[in-house]
Amino acid sequence: MNIELVNVWYRYSRVEDWALRGISISFRSGEVIYIDGPNGSGKTTLLKIASLIYRPLQGSVLVDGNNFWNLDEDSKTLIRRRVMYVHDRPILLRGTVLDNVAYGLHIRGVDRGSAFDTSMSILSVLGIDSLAHTPIQRLSTGQAQLVAIARALAIKPEILFLDEPFSNLDREKRLALISTLNQFRARGMGIVFSSHNADVMELGKHRRVVLGGGTIIDAYEVV
Amino acid sequence: MSEVFDTIVRSIIVSGIATALASLWSIPLTYLLVLRNRRAMVMEVIIETLVGIPTVLLGLLLYMLLSSSGPLGFLNLLYTPQAMIIGESILITPLIISVSYRSIRDMAKLYHELALSIGADRFQRIRLIIGQSLPGVVAACITGFSRAIGELGIAMMIGGNIRGYTRVMTTAIALEVAKGNFEEAITLGIALLAITISISIAIKLLSRVRIT
């Protein structure tokens, strides 16, 4: 899968300044990209446009060569099911951890039993399977973040977009998550994330894109 | 004492039916307003203005409509529980829309993004938003019930406070105070207070929805 942003501009309603100014960048399966930059540089906006949530005001988003925003609603849904964006402040549904992790599978038509089995295995990989039947009200912010990430991993997206995934995790949990992400990367998943955390180096070879004032000010390979 | 009990039960029934009726049109309308998202600000202003409409004004309008010389006089609804139900349901409609609008709008904003990111289709997105906003909607209906049961103007003007027929807690309290029967008025007042406190607790419990 290849998502290509071509000369993308974006501005939030009732805000005069552009959040993104003429950004061109591509995201591919199997590749790890680390989006770096200070607060307000446009990282979250870029991730939401690349993960097909926000529509750019100018420019185009090409998915495998097709202009995504010109497609019909059904085609858009099918493409969206191949990517996943995880918010920096996790949004969970009412219910238990297992209900949340299985939700993405449910809406893809996976039967309840299989969805729960897959979800349990993901929770187990992340080391939070003991929380499976815990109502989300009882989770800490860090645990909620892991649950949101588990929900994303359960659907095995071709490209996973993570907004500040490590911000509420202690070092042990961070390293466990990085190890899990590396396993999924080895299976061909693309990972795009923003972070302020130094542990990202543990992800190994990746492309670092530095944003500033809504534009790309630097991009290089890190090995 | 049995008359007091009858009055309490009648209040709950009249307000309960009025709330159910008002919810029947208010909730779908609110979802439509949020999901269509057109002229949202104008709608917000109109609805919030209507929330503050004086009940005596609404009572007067309904009285003029339902009185024998009014355009709906032929229905013979004036001074009946049905008229009170209609009046109260109209009164609480803007309140239910206003309270549920805020809840549904916030939930829609939050969960629409989640639904898109997780790959939900249009129908699944709407279902998700409805499911997640349900506690807020129920809380809005309870707020409406609370307003209806504590309402005096409409109940008095178009209900007429007829003993054993249209007398509800608020009109009974007003009457007992006028007669100097403070003991009965206080009993009814305590009952009304207990009901509204129970409603507040229910709202608190229903509003405890986790959004991390």
Image: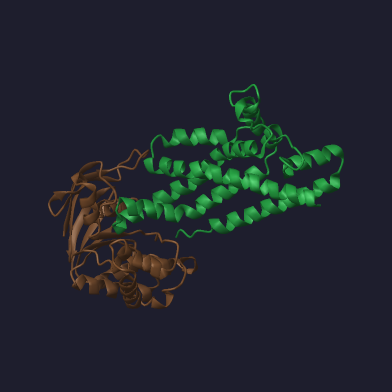
Chain colours: A brown, B green
Which one is in front, A149 or B168?
Answer: B168
Residue under the image location 32 percent in, 40 percent down = A17
Which one is in front, A132 or A204?
Answer: A132
The quadrant holding residue A219 is bottom left
Whether residue B206 is visible, yes or no, is yes
Where does residue B153 sit, x and y in percent of width and height? 69, 35
Residue under the image location 31 percent in, 54 percent down = B116
Q: Is residue B136 left or right of residue B109?
A: right
User: Where A202 sits versus B59, above or below?
Assistant: below
Residue under the image location 71 percent in, 40 percent down = B166
Tell me how many marks there are.
Answer: 0
Q: Is residue A210 left or right of residue B7?
A: left
Where does residue B179 sit, x and y in percent of width and height? 86, 38
Which one is in front, B75 or B65?
Answer: B75
Where does residue B123 sit, x and y in percent of width and height? 33, 51
Q: Residue furthest top?
A: B69
Quarter the C terminus of chain B occupies? bottom left
The quadrant holding residue A124 is bottom left
Whether residue A39 is visible, yes or no, is no
Q: Is residue A37 left or right of residue B51?
A: left
Where does residue B107 sit, x and y in percent of width and height? 43, 51
Q: Residue furthest right?
A: B180
